[in-house]
Amino acid sequence: MYYELFAIARITDPVKTSKEAVKIASTIGKLILNNRGVIRDITSLGARPLPKIMSKEQERHFQGYHFLMGFDVSANVQAQLLRTLRSDPRILRANIMKHDMTKKLNTGTSVQQALNSIQNQ
């Protein structure tokens, strides 16, 4: 089943914003690959201000590094992945969305779907 992970990583050093996100993405990727999953794509959305101040581990954050990761994995591994991400102090927020693959074989990421809908109008 095709899933898409949307995650917001904390920014500890404003000069090196992407280094923490790269480490997190590689950790998530290793977890998926070790459990016989397939990573389809990783999309960086960059460092952005958060819509509201978020707190995690008694720290307040006003900006975060956003990224998307598309992958195929079993439901048990997906639940384990979400549990791991929610307990990780480097991740401010994480959400996994399931995409229906019966209609189209290549759905693309949420960003690609939004851009395609804008171009079709």
Image (cartoon, rainbow, N blue to C red):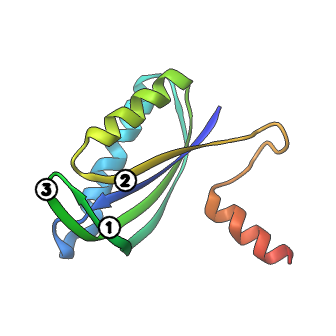
The three-letter amino acid code for the residue at tag 2 is Arg
Query: In the image, residue 74 lies at what x, y percent?
Result: 56, 24
Whether pointer 3 and pointer 1 mark residues with C-beta atoms closer than 8 Å, the reply is no
Q: In this view, does 118 lie to the left or right of 70?
A: right
Query: In the image, residue 115 lies at what x, y percent?
Result: 70, 71
Residue 98 versus residue 67 in the image, above or below: above
> Marks 2 and 3, how far apart in space?
15 Å
Residue at the disc numbered 3: 58
Between disc 2 and disc 1, the foreground one is 2
Image quadrant in which the N terminus is located: top right
Query: In the image, residue 109 lies at what x, y percent?
Result: 63, 55
Which numbered tag is attached to residue 64?
1
The three-letter amino acid code for the residue at tag 3 is Gln
> Marks 2 and 1, how far apart in space?
10 Å
Q: Is residue 12 left or right of residue 65?
A: left
Whether pointer 2 and pointer 1 mark residues with C-beta atoms closer than 8 Å, the reply is yes
Which numbered tag is attached to residue 93?
2
The three-letter amino acid code for the residue at tag 1 is Gly
Nearer to me, 85 or 73 = 85
Q: Which of marks 2 and 1 is nearer the N terminus?
A: 1
Number of numbered discs overlaid on the protein picture:
3
* Residue located at (17% from left, 65% from top): 12
